[in-house]
Amino acid sequence: MTMAYQTQFVERLERTPTSTAVSYRFKRPPGFDFTAGQYMVVDLGEERIHPLSLSDCPEESRFIEFTKRMTGSPFCQRLEELTTADTITVKGPSGKFCVEESDAPLVLMAGGIGITPLRSILKSQEKKRTTAGSIILLYGNKNQEDIAFREELENLQLADYRLVHVLDDPAGVENAYQGFIRGEIVAEEVANPTKALYMISGPTGMVEAIKKNLLKINIDEERIRTDVFLGYD
Ligand SMILES: Cc1cc2nc3c(=O)[nH]c(=O)nc-3n(C[C@H](O)[C@H](O)[C@H](O)COP(=O)(O)OP(=O)(O)OC[C@H]3O[C@@H](n4cnc5c(N)ncnc54)[C@H](O)[C@@H]3O)c2cc1C
């Protein structure tokens, strides 16, 4: 059964240089347990309700956090009005976009704000330090201004981890690929592509396009997990 929790707003943090992605933190409600990669349904009242991934890791006991791409919608407007006197309702956690126990190489692929569940997974792996295999993050964005959590993701303390930027406009980002995340990049960056596990997260069109690309380079469908962010197409 999905549980509902009341939780008090704590703070907001801007995650890109141009404030296009903002994290909102709330006190962690007693009994709210989740696995990295899951989402919750956030209810701000007045029918402003969205599913949003938990963007911090379960090991963070002080707060829960989600990160919203700012679109100027009524939901975003309400978020920007929150003060520490406000409480909201969250329902969950839900979802199965979680890391399986395996020593296969893990290939994480995010388009834009799709980074949120993957950031939770990466931070959790960093805290646990139990990863058996390598991790590579292929992170697609428009340009350097649009890369959420950039510094943190570039400096994660994980034994065998690499971040590869893929940008429409790669100016200012060293060693970035130009364009979209595609099969040739996977073939070039992943040592044994058919042996890896893939987790793709982002807007519907992007997730479908990457999945098609993976199938084209003979990745078994069973090795691919997806998290589709409805509401951005
Ligand atoms: C599992 C999951 C996890 C998500 N995690 C994140 C996250 O971490 N960060 C983030 O920014 N977004 C996330 N989203 C998307 C989020 O729920 C919103 O749909 C999106 O942020 C757009 O909301 P908005 O307030 O900006 O725009 P809105 O004006 O509310 O929506 C834009 C358009 O999309 C339609 N729409 C909105 N929500 C949905 C929906 N759920 N299904 C179908 N159509 C819809 C609206 O009718 C409107 O036409 C997630 C979605 C899912 C399903």
Image (cartoon, rainbow, N blue to C red):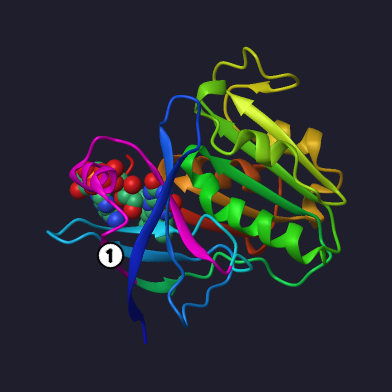
Horizontally, residue 70 falls left or right of residue 207, namely: left
| Horizontal side of residue 197 vs 142, given as left or right | right
Task: Report the residue at 26% width, 60% height from top.
Answer: 86
Q: Is residue 187 left or right of residue 165?
A: right
Secondary element under disc 1, as helix, strand or loop, is: strand
Taking depth in this image into account, of 206 and 28 the one nearest to the observer is: 28
* 109 over 185 or under it: above or below: below
Q: Quadrant of the N terminus?
A: bottom left
Q: Which residues are drawn in magenta? A: 61-90
Question: In this orientation, does residue 176 appear?
Answer: yes
The image quadrant that residue 173 belongs to is: top right
Position in image of residue 149 (x %, y %): 58, 39
Q: Which residue is mark 1?
A: 87
- The picture quadrant where one finds residue 178 is top right
Residue 186 appears at what percent x and percent y?
A: 73, 38
Is 87 within the magenta? yes
- Image: 130 above or below 11: below
Left or right: 215, with 45 as reference point = right
Looking at the image, which residue is at 47% across and 77% down? 32
Q: Position of residue 143 (x, y in %)?
A: 54, 21
Residue 81 in the magenta stretch? The answer is yes
User: What amino acid type should be assigned to the residue bearing mark 1?
Assistant: Thr
Residue farthest along the top direction in this orientation: 171
Q: Is residue 6 above or below residue 141?
A: below
Quadrant (top left, top right, bottom left, bottom right) of the C terminus: top left
Residue at left 74%, top 62%? 127
Image-quadrant location for residue 93: bottom left
What residue is shown at x 28% (from left), y 65% (from top)? Answer: 87
Count every numbered label the image shows and give the total. Answer: 1
Q: Is residue 230 visible from the viewing direction of this image?
A: no
